[in-house]
């Protein structure tokens, strides 16, 4: 057995070098039974006695990290015991056949893998004395962490043995557990582009894009704001609907799918692709059909059609509802071109696994989407921000905020319930979360009491269900498990007191953590990384952009260019007239097209999100919705075929350059093409603006006093559109108003009538007027009880006492920053990391690397 001294840092470096050069796994494999192996852990001591009845000691453990482990074995002096070390496949990776006294064995391990240790006597001689076994990580790379207090004084120094660990993150929510506070670098994030050949017809938002047998239904949807509905309740035969635009699918293998739900349990639908040749109708023998029984909940129905040998000129997508009396809603229809490899893999999956794979890798998109402005958001073990930042549903109580995570509610009536809510907490389906907090109840009266309200939502924020958890009326720890069913992506939580209860309720340290066991309280701690770039790929995914970090900067290996084709791009002054469409051309875009790789591009119309088919030569533009890139020596142009039905131009009408420019300004296209020579470029970061802050001083448009009330006056601010949006849509109920002169938090009312005291305010955002109302105490203003200040008095007051209004935006706003470097961090324990994008929302991965202690 080899033995390496570890008394100095120099010897550690030497040992590590020797291990890298010479310590290789021992060849060999055994078929031993490991079911009886005893589980052991790092740094603990284990002992045993061997004899003829128990001739071997068998142990197993899971490696905590990738690196070198040390096995220490103390053998009784009167015997010779041997030791073998195996990996999870029972390959021998370390051994000794002459174990005498105190020995150590060093061997390589990989994090999360299982390793087995067998101790035995090779010569059949045993001792009544115990052997002693210990496993520990080998220390060879030390890092010192310094911790300072708020005054900058050093309060703690820790020395860690640090190694690097890589973690693969999938789009959506991930959980990563680390054993120390550490920075993390983004080592890889590859792009992805999805092109739905149905364009925007798959979203069912516009009535006219399908046959009139399918209507738009705003009462239910899976995506967007509406779905398509085929109502066969009054018919005696099947009812059908087809999309309006013809599809060029011949020569392709396509993944075809749609989300659907029925009004009954026994509905049946058919999904068709039907081909047409020449002037024939869509009734040829090239008809592909798949039958489905549709449930009463939204589900995905999909199939693969092999059209690789077909030569039909056009194809349509058709949906049939077969049974009289049935009503079926449809949403998120798609047609994706796939490779032979993808076809084989999808067909190999079971039905549940196939559904999950399609949802993850082929989510519904309108037209063409890529990984746009990707981001990483990390939250520590507590997923809840301070309740002081939550919104209120009712105000019939007194709320005293003592600190971020502690407040007192006094409720003296039984007319309304109390509900303080936090919305849109991202969660993982089919898991359990634990909610916990400290609750003090005094002067309880009535019935009911405090409880946790839960609402579940899908990935489009549509409500799935809601319920109340565990009513409590006495002081004590409040804990409850929140079970997340399948299909849930977000939850809303409400801290609630029933309308029938009264009393004083002290809310302290609310916490939501992953797993069924409540963890000790800690405030929520977040970090984020928002990257200002688009990561694309070829349609088949064989060529991808890649984002990576080098040092503290972020770079993209750029393989594609994305160009918005609108009226600002150079236009030629003439067009080619064809039956039913016109061909227009763009020039003066040589700087882009010089880099273009022929035959590797996609063009999408942003107005109707129709996928355009690329011709190989100009003459191949034989139909609408086609385009062609010319990158010859003499000229570099893009030719696009525009259907007359889109443009409104007559069959024989020749539009002017200005008319063409106006068409593209109103209907911009997106051209994505592969570069002949990819290159590296530096990317910047962006910030996600969630709150907006406005300073209210004497320069604002203050009105005269609205109401003179006992002890205070109500004033209002007009012309608030610039701050809160033209229709008020920019504001949620999470807002705060602070007086600069006193730095005191104003209390927000939900309606004007609830402004019943000074230091209150509320927004009015109805369509007629947009105003802010504020109550000012006479003591603050110096205005007498009966004095009515004029507009000048009010402006003077706010000039001397400016307020700041901060409100949460209903839709966060992306703001580009010039920052090129930022450190992304993880905290000790469990970290929830969301990998997302403002474009395609699934089907891509990122790799991060961080330090671990061994």
Image (cartoon, rainbow, N blue to C red):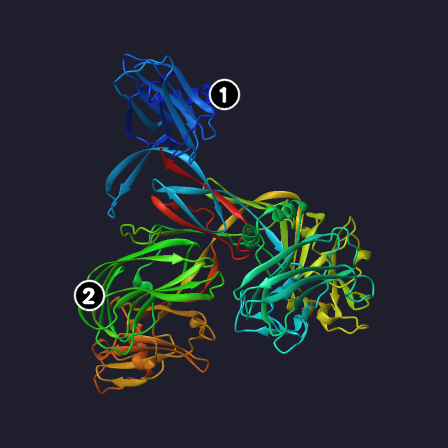
Q: Quadrant of the N terminus?
A: top left
Does residue 49 sit above or below 418 in this rendering?
above
Name the residue furthest left. Answer: 443
Label 1 element class: loop
Is 699 situated left or right of 655 in this image?
left
- Which of the pair 517/839 is nearer the observer? 517
Counting from the top left corner in percent of width and height, residue 780 is at 22, 75
Whether residue 530 is visible to the viewer of this picture, yes or no, is: no
Q: Quadrant of the C terminus?
A: top left
- Which of the pair 103/686 is nearer the observer? 103
Which residue is under mark 2? 441
Numbered tag placed on residue 27 in the rendering: 1
Name the residue furthest front. Answer: 53
Neighbourhood count class around disc 1 (C-alpha, 10 Å): few under 14, some 14–19, many 20 upward? few
Q: Going from the N terminus, do you reach mark 1 or mark 2 first?
A: 1
Counting from the top left corner in percent of width and height, residue 356 is at 54, 52
Does residue 563 sit above or below 494 in this rendering?
above
At horizontal 27% and vertical 52% (from top left) the residue drawn is: 521
At horizontal 34% and vertical 50% (from top left) the residue drawn is: 381
Q: Give the Cα separation between the discs numbered 1 and 2.
A: 67 Å
Counting from the top left corner in percent of width and height, residue 290 is at 66, 59
Is 151 situated left or right of 106 in this image?
left
Counting from the top left corner in percent of width and height, residue 708 is at 27, 85
Q: Nearer the viewer, mark 1 or mark 2?
A: 1
């Amino acid at each position: 057995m080899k033995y390496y001294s570890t008394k100095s840092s120099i010897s550690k470096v030497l040992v590590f070098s020797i291990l890298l050069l010479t310590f290789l796994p021992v060849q060999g494999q055994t078929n031993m039974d490991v079911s009886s192996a005893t589980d052991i852990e790092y740094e603990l001591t284990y002992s045993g006695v061997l004899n003829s009845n128990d001739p071997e000691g068998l142990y197993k453990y899971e490696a905590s990290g990738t690196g070198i482990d040390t096995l220490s074995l103390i053998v009784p002096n009167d015997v010779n015991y041997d030791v073998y070390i195996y990996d999870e496949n029972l390959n021998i990776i370390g051994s000794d056949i002459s174990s005498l006294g105190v020995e150590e064995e060093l061997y390589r391990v990989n994090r999360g893998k299982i390793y087995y240790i067998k101790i035995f006597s090779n010569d059949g001689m045993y001792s009544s004395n115990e052997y002693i076994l210990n496993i520990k990580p080998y220390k060879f790379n030390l890092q010192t962490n310094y911790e300072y207090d708020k005054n900058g004084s050093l309060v703690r120094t820790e020395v860690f043995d640090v190694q690097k660990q890589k973690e693969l993150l999938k789009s959506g929510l991930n959980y990563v557990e680390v054993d120390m506070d550490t920075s993390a670098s983004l080592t890889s994030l590859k792009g992805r582009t999805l092109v739905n050949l149905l364009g925007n017809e798959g979203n069912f938002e516009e009535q006219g894009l399908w046959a009139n047998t399918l209507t738009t239904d705003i009462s239910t949807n899976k995506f967007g704001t509406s779905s398509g509905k085929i109502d066969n309740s009054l018919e005696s035969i099947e009812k059908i609907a087809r999309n309006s635009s013809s599809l060029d699918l011949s020569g392709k293998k396509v993944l075809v799918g749609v989300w659907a739900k029925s009004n009954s349990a026994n509905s049946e639908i058919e999904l068709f692709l039907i081909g047409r040749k020449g002037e024939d109708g869509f009734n040829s023998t090239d008809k592909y059909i798949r039958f489905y029984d549709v449930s009463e909940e939204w589900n995905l129905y999909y199939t693969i059609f092999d059209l690789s040998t077909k030569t039909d000129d056009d194809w349509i997508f058709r949906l049939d509802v077969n049974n009289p009396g049935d009503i079926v809603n449809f949403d998120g229809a798609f047609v994706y071109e796939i490779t032979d490899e993808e076809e084989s893999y999808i067909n190999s999956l079971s039905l549940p696994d196939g559904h999950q794979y399609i949802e993850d890798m082929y989510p519904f998109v309108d037209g063409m989407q890529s990984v746009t402005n990707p981001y990483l958001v990390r939250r520590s073990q507590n997923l809840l921000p301070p309740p002081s930042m939550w919104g209120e549903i009712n105000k019939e109580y007194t709320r005293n905020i003592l600190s971020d995570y502690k407040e007192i509610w006094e409720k003296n009536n039984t007319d309304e319930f109390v509900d303080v809510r936090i919305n849109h907490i991202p969660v993982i389906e089919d898991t359990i979360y634990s909610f916990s907090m400290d609750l003090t109840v005094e002067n309880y009266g009535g019935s009911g009491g405090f409880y946790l309200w839960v609402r579940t939502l899908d990935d489009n924020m549509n409500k799935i269900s809601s319920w109340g958890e565990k009513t409590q009326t006495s002081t004590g720890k409040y804990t409850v498990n929140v079970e997340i069913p399948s299909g849930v992506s977000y939850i809303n939580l409400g801290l609630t007191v029933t309308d029938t209860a009264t009393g004083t309720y002290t809310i302290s340290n609310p916490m939501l953590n992953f797993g069924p066991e409540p963890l000790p309280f800690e405030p929520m701690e977040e970090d984020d990384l928002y990257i200002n770039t688009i990561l694309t790929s070829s349609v088949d995914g064989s060529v991808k952009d890649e984002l990576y970090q080098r040092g503290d900067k972020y770079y993209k290996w750029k393989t594609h260019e994305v160009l918005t084709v609108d009226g600002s791009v150079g236009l030629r002054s003439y067009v080619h007239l064809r039956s039913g469409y016109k061909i227009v051309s763009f020039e003066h875009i040589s700087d882009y097209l010089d880099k273009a790789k022929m035959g590797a591009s996609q063009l999408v119309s942003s107005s109707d999100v129709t996928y355009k088919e690329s011709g190989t030569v100009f003459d191949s533009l034989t139909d609408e919705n086609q385009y062609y890139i010319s990158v010859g020596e003499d000229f570099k142009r893009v030719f696009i075929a525009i259907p007359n039905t889109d443009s409104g131009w007559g069959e024989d009408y020749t539009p002017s350059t200005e008319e063409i420019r106006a068409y593209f300004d109103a209907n911009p296209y997106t051209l994505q093409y592969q570069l002949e020579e990819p290159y590296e470029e530096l990317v910047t970061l962006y910030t996600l603006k969630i709150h907006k802050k406005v300073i209210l001083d004497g320069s604002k448009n203050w009105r005269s006093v609205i109401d003179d009330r006992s002890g205070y006056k109500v004033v209002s601010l007009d012309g608030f559109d610039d701050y809160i949006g033209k229709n008020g849509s920019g504001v949620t109920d999470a807002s705060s108003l602070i007086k600069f002169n006193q730095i005191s938090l104003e209390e927000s009312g939900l309606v004007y009538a609830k402004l019943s005291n000074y230091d209150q305010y509320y927004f009015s955002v109805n369509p007629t007027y947009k105003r802010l109302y504020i109550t000012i105490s006479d003591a603050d203003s110096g205005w007498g009880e009966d004095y009515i200040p004029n507009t000048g008095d009010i402006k003077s007051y706010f000039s001397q006492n400016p307020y700041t209004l901060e409100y949460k935006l209903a839709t966060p706003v992306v703001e580009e920053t010039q920052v090129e470097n930022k450190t992304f961090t993880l905290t000790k324990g469990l970290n929830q990391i969301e990998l997302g994008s403002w474009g395609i929302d699934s089907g891509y991965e990122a790799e991060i690397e961080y330090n671990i202690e061994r």
